[in-house]
Image (cartoon, rainbow, N blue to C red):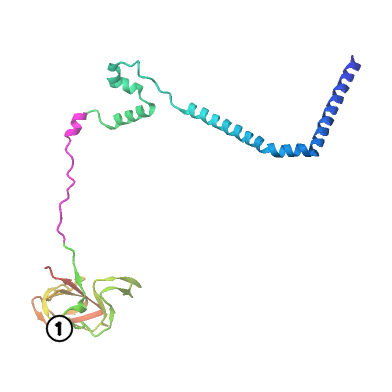
Amino acid sequence: MKRKRRYSKKKQEIKKIRFVESVHRQFFQRMHDLDYLQWMQRNGVRYVGAICLFAALFSVSLYMLQTESNQPVIVSNAGVRDGDAKNPDFQHKTAKPEEQHAVSDVEQIVPPAIAADDLQNVSKPDMRLESKSEEKTVYLNPLHLSGYQAPCGGMLVYNYGLGYDPVYEDYRFHDAICYDSGNGPAFACVDGIVAQVQMEQHWQIAIQTQRGILKYSGLDTCTATVGSRVAAGEQIGTAKEKLYIQVEKNDV
């Protein structure tokens, strides 16, 4: 028995070796066969095209199977009675899970004491705002006033409008002008009537002119009184290190 098994194994091994040798021999012969190579060159494109077509059909079939599996199941309403279709309880039960969740959220948000008819009768808040006639203050350049004179003997630090501010060291809009008075005397810039004297306020003196109210800030002392008439160049007090002049336009 052992000899037969060994003989059969050797016979199978010999067959395998001969088969491999025959395949190798045929392959070697075809590689050197000019007619076979020309045939492969003519028909190679067809084989490649057939393989690509098979791959495309296989991918399309897989895509169709996937789309069919993702489609929702449509339940027919043929067996539903008209009364059941109009019943809100039935509609709530047959609704999708997302719709049921949304309905339950709405039911929790709306208080049960307020009915649908009552919601229509709720008065809407009046969104109209009362118009406030707040007039914006308009300032003028003091240097443009008729008969303007410098309020002190110092140099102009910055002018009205957009310009460099040496105090803050940046560019900004100024609604007033500033002088380096150097603790000297202060003079009236234009002709007018003193309308206000409040030394404890920021704007200490207000002089009513033809075009607007001329105001002073940075005064140390004041000799003018309310209601007195002053002329341009007349001394009205003494200034501190910096003197500020502002003109507020008269209301038209």
Is 59 inside the magenta-drawn segment? Answer: no
Position of residue 135 relative to residue 6, above or below, is below
Which quadrant is home to the C terminus? bottom left
At a point 80% along the width and 38% down the height, the residue shown is: 33
State whether the magenta stretch is mostly helix, strand or loop.
loop
In the visual, does 2 lie left or right of 238?
A: right
Helix or strand or loop: what does disc 1 sit on? loop
Is 131 inside the magenta-drawn segment? Answer: yes
For label 1, the residue is 232
The quarter of the picture where residue 151 lies is bottom left
At a point 18% along the width and 33% down the height, the residue shown is: 120
Q: How many marks?
A: 1
Residue 57 location (% of width, % of height): 57, 31
Which quadrant is home to the N terminus? top right
In the visual, does 114 lie left or right of 2?
A: left
Q: Residues within 10 Å of mark 1 (few under 14, many from 20)?
A: some
The quarter of the picture where residue 111 lies is top left
| Nearer to the camera, 244 or 171 | 171
Query: What span is in magenta?
Result: 115-134
| Nearer to the camera, 103 or 224 | 103
Residue 38 location (% of width, % of height): 74, 39
The quarter of the picture where residue 191 lies is bottom left
Residue 168 location (% of width, % of height): 34, 71
Position of residue 237 relative to residue 248, above or below, is below
The single residue placed furthest to the top in the displayed view is: 1
At a point 76% along the width and 36% down the height, the residue shown is: 36
At a point 18% along the width and 42% down the height, the residue shown is: 125
| Nearer to the camera, 99 or 69 | 69
Q: Hey, what amino acid is under mark 1?
A: Ala
